[in-house]
Amino acid sequence: MEDVKYYTQEGLDALKRELSQLEAVERPKISQAIAEARDKGDLSENAEYDAAKEAQGLLELKIANLRNLIAKARVLDESKIDVSKVLIYSIVKIKNMKNNAEMTYTIVPESESDLKAGKISVSSPIAKALIGNSKGDIVSVQAPAGVMDFQILDISR
């Protein structure tokens, strides 16, 4: 089975921008560094040349991985997200049952997680506990400080 990953259009566009940057800017920079190191003479004892060639190999691997990711990517139609239960791309408002603090998170793939923006990875402990549950449910999350209980106040997209 192919390894399909789902993204928002925004997430897929970010991957495409990164690939474009690597191919259009970083690749020529490394080629230039290799050419300059080659011009310095004996390649068998040229650390700059070796470092540039290694950087080129790593860059090409990153480019190949990004191309593969983009080729297998599917854009999720956010209008079709079921809001009766928590799923990937759900926006979930939860309340900490211990201190009544309320938080809102969007559950996203690992590649799109950004805690400062309120986007938590689908593989995070909180997201794992929330997935599949409905509004009003109370879920328990194993945290470093012990078990924390959260109530799901709202689910949207």
Image (cartoon, rainbow, N blue to C red):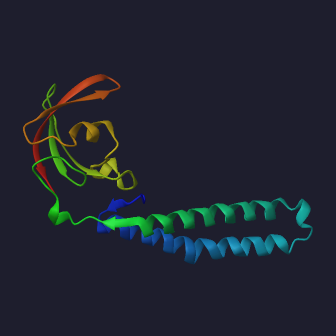
- 34 w.r.t. 110: above or below: below
Of the 4 image quadrants, the one containing the C terminus is bottom left
**Residue drawn at 65 percent across, 73 percent down:** 29
Is 85 located above or below residue 41 in the figure?
A: above
Task: State the residue in front, 14 or 64.
Answer: 64
Q: How many marks?
A: 0
Front residue of 43 and 124: 124
Looking at the image, the residue that sits furthest to the left is 136
The foreground one among 42 and 135 is 135
Q: What is the quadrant of residue 112 in the picture?
A: bottom left
Which residue is painted at 22% across and 43% down in the image? 131
Q: Residue furthest top?
A: 146
Image x and y of residue 15, in percent: 43, 66
Q: Residue at x 50, y 75 (%)?
A: 20
What percent of the width, then of the height, locates residue 92?
A: 17, 47
The N terminus, quarter of image:
bottom left
Q: Is residue 125 above or below residue 3?
A: above
- Judge left or right: residue 53 versus residue 133: right
- Residue 68 at x, y percent in the picture: 49, 66
Q: Is the residue 17 above or below the residue 3 in the image?
A: below
Extreme front residue here? 1
Task: Tell me: 25 left or right of 52.
Answer: left
- Residue 136, percent across and down? 7, 37
Q: Which residue shows up at 25% across the image and 52% down it?
A: 88
